[in-house]
Amino acid sequence: MRGLYIHIPFCNSLCSYCDFPKIIAKNDIKEKYINRLILELKSYKNYYDSIDTIFIGGGTPNSLSFDMLEMLFNELDELIDFNKIKEFTIELNPENVDLKLAQLLKKHHVNRISMGAQTINEDILKLLNRHHKKEDIIKAIEIFNSVGITNINLDFMFGMPNTNIGMVKEDLNFIKELDLCHVSYYCLIVEENTKLNTLINKGKIKPLDDDLESDIYYFIADEMKKMGYHHYEISNFAKNGYESIHNLKYWNTKEYIGVGAGASGYLDGKRYDNFKSVFKYLKDFKEDSYELNIQDKKEEFFLMGLRKVDGVSIKEYKNRFNSDPLLDFNLKKFLNNNLIIIDDDNIRIASDKLFISNLVFEEFVGE
Ligand code: SF4
């Protein structure tokens, strides 16, 4: 089965570390965008029998007004048979959650919430230009639970300037108290065109030391495991049965429809990218579309599969491509350097090398 990804490229304010495509826009632009998005959604109506997951991401989907969200949900109700949908996630900022919104989501079949927490440390939240507090997260979760939505993910971040292991312990204690179903824990990457990068370049703040970042990553992974979470992807942890079905489609290179400015999709063997600019998207949807050859498909399956902690199933690879990954890829160097391990049916990144997985991927692409 396929997934459906819907991108909402608007935010209420801009986080200091973010380089995703997003804008702060007035309501008239948002209205035009929703109408356009609905038009694009309708263009895929023949495919909706084949989807079982939906993910509305951003940007900040709840930067849309209640009426705009309702309009989008009503359209989805028209197009999609929700009996087939196993997981319907929406990303939200915790400070803009209220009961009316939660009831709307419940009414329209949303069964999973993903909120950006990043940390509970107020000084660091200010540095990141996030406008919520720990109390907003607790309140939002209580509101969702009150309407019967209990499958909740929080995104956390580590490796921010001015942070230390003590702060990470406080975030982990918070996660423990909340007893969440799912946690995504990302290492901050200071991207070029961000405010954080400017502050670092001006010498106003110092990036965290790489070795400390690595120690923190493995500390988090251990602590999450002790709390009963399954570390199933480099940055993702789930209680049993709560692994994200939609995101696993990306790591298993399954097909998905992507709609909205900046969205990409993989449909009928072709990858496509929509225009990133909202204004270009209002005129035309797709910027690019390209077919993958068999070699591209094998590499994608292999590299995306390595993001999963269990790695790539040799059996699944053989079934999909009718060839052997051990012959298709030159793994000698990676095995000799203990970067990659072969356990029974799986080829995976060694547990103590997960933090440097990006280097492994770069090496692979350079092979
Ligand atoms: S809310 Fe998300 S998309 Fe918007 S600026 Fe912050 S990190 Fe970027």
Image (tube, rainbow, N blue to C red):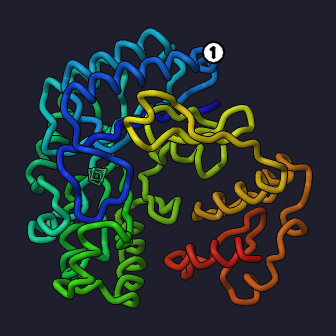
Which of the 4 quarters of the picture holds residue 164?
bottom left
Which of the 4 quarters of the picture holds residue 52?
top right
Does 262 appear above or below 41? below
Q: Is mark 1 within 8 Å of ligand 1?
A: no
Does 194 appear above or below 9? below
Q: Is residue 322 visible in this depiction of the protein?
A: yes
Q: Dot 1 lies on which element?
A: helix
Does 218 appear above or below 178? below
Q: Position of residue 103 (x, y in %)?
A: 21, 22
Q: Position of residue 79 (x, y in %)?
A: 49, 12
Q: Residue at x 11, y 65 (%)?
A: 126
Identify the residue position indicated by label 1 in the image.
46
Relative side of 305 to 151, left or right: right
Q: Position of residue 241 (x, y in %)?
A: 48, 45
Q: Position of residue 12 (x, y in %)?
A: 18, 44
Q: How many marks?
A: 1
Q: Residue at x 20, y 65 (%)?
A: 128
- Which image quadrant: the N terminus? top right
Q: Is residue 245 visible in this depiction of the protein?
A: no
Q: Residue at x 31, y 60 (%)?
A: 18
Viewer-proximal residue among 279 and 172: 279
Identify which amino acid the numbered label 1 is placed on.
Asn
- Which image quadrant: the C terminus? bottom right
Viewer-proximal residue among 282 and 186: 282
Viewer-proximal residue among 309 and 267: 267
Does 196 appear above or below 18? below
Q: Residues within 10 Å of mark 1 (few under 14, many from 20)?
A: few
Q: Residue at x 91, y 56 (%)?
A: 323
